[in-house]
Amino acid sequence: MTEKELIKSIVNYFEKNIFEKHINASLKTHSKLKSYNINPIVVKYLSKVLDGKYSPEGIAKALFYPRVLGTSINTSFGTQIQKMFVELQIAKGSLIKGMDIEFFDKIEKREKWCQLKSGPNTINSEDVKPLIRKFTDTIQLARTNSALKGIRNTDFVVGVLYGEVTELSMHYKTIDKTHPVLIGRDFWHRITGFPNFYDKLVVALHVCISNLDTKDFINKGCEDLASEIRNSPLFKF
């Protein structure tokens, strides 16, 4: 597959499996009151902050906005990206526990086992030791497999989808001392073989996003949720 064809395939995948699914879920699922566990004190306060008063519209915004603009899209992104690499045959699903994908590093010309992360600040301090321990245990187990003789610590990597090396948190830098953290341009170059793939992909995705029909789904979803809230016995206005 050429670089242009691969970029087109990834953009199409994003549009169908991430963007459109997110819009549909926002309208069909997140606009339903039953999809929320509600803290009645906090939600009243947030209603006041967002709408200036305790109202169905304020409650709807307090519930809908964080779900749709935060949790929902981030969860969808993380889940679908791993599937995308495998479905588009950019990488293989890893048979080694704890690894997300396996790919042939086009720069080092070696097989790599990779745990995927979204961005340069997506792990906490308490995640570092367990992640390194998981890598160490996995490597020790892999070395007992005669098919994986000659395996190195540097063959087990963290792949960060976007960002710059200078943006990596100290937690990632700690991991990088033992296992390479490949981020942004470097990661996409290694997995696709195309040096400028990351920058071209970002441009193509921006074009796709500009052309998306978002159907004013934020306001529509909020309105539908506010209507349910207005008629719910859970609230008294």
Image (tube, rainbow, N blue to C red):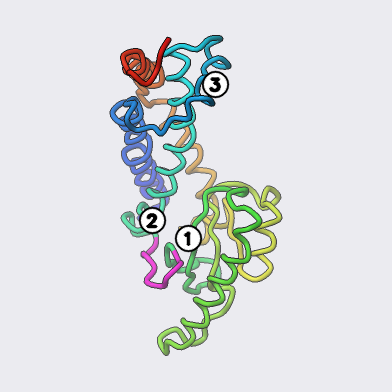
For the stretch drawn in magenta, the main secondary structure is loop
Name the amino acid type tagged 2.
Phe
Q: How many marks?
A: 3
Label pair 1/2, CB-CB below 8 angstroms:
yes
Image quadrant where one finds the C terminus: top left
Q: Residue at x 49, y 35 (%)?
A: 70
**CA neighbours of label 1 inside 10 A, class few (<14), some (14 to 19), many (20+):** many
Residue span colored magenta: 91-99
Q: How far across and down, in percent of the image, does residue 212 sit?
A: 37, 26
Find numbered disc 1 in the image and state the secondary structure of the residue it sits on: helix
Vertical side of 12 occupied by 208: above or below: above
Vertical side of 19 occupied by 98: above or below: below
**CA neighbours of label 2 inside 10 A, class few (<14), some (14 to 19), many (20+):** some
Task: Quote the CA–CA distance across marks 1 and 3.
Answer: 44 Å
The label shown at residue 85 is: 2
Q: How far across and down, in percent of the image, does residue 125 sit?
A: 66, 56
Task: Quote the CA–CA distance across marks 2 and 3.
Answer: 39 Å
Does label 2 or label 3 sit earlier along the sequence? 3
Of circles 2 and 3, the one toward us is 3
**62 in the magenta segment:** no
Q: Which residue is mark 3?
A: 46
Vertical side of 72 occupied by 156: above or below: below
Does label 1 or label 3 sit earlier along the sequence? 3
Q: Residue at x 39, y 62 (%)?
A: 91
Q: How far across and down, in percent of the image, does residue 41 sit?
A: 52, 25
Name the amino acid type tagged 3.
Leu
Name the amino acid type tagged 1.
Ile
Q: Which residue is mark 1?
A: 191
Q: How far across and down, in percent of the image, does residue 110 sit?
A: 50, 74
Find numbered disc 2 in the image and state the secondary structure of the residue it sits on: helix
Vertical side of 148 occupied by 109: above or below: above
Q: In terms of depth relative to the viewer, which is nearer, 13 or 178? A: 178
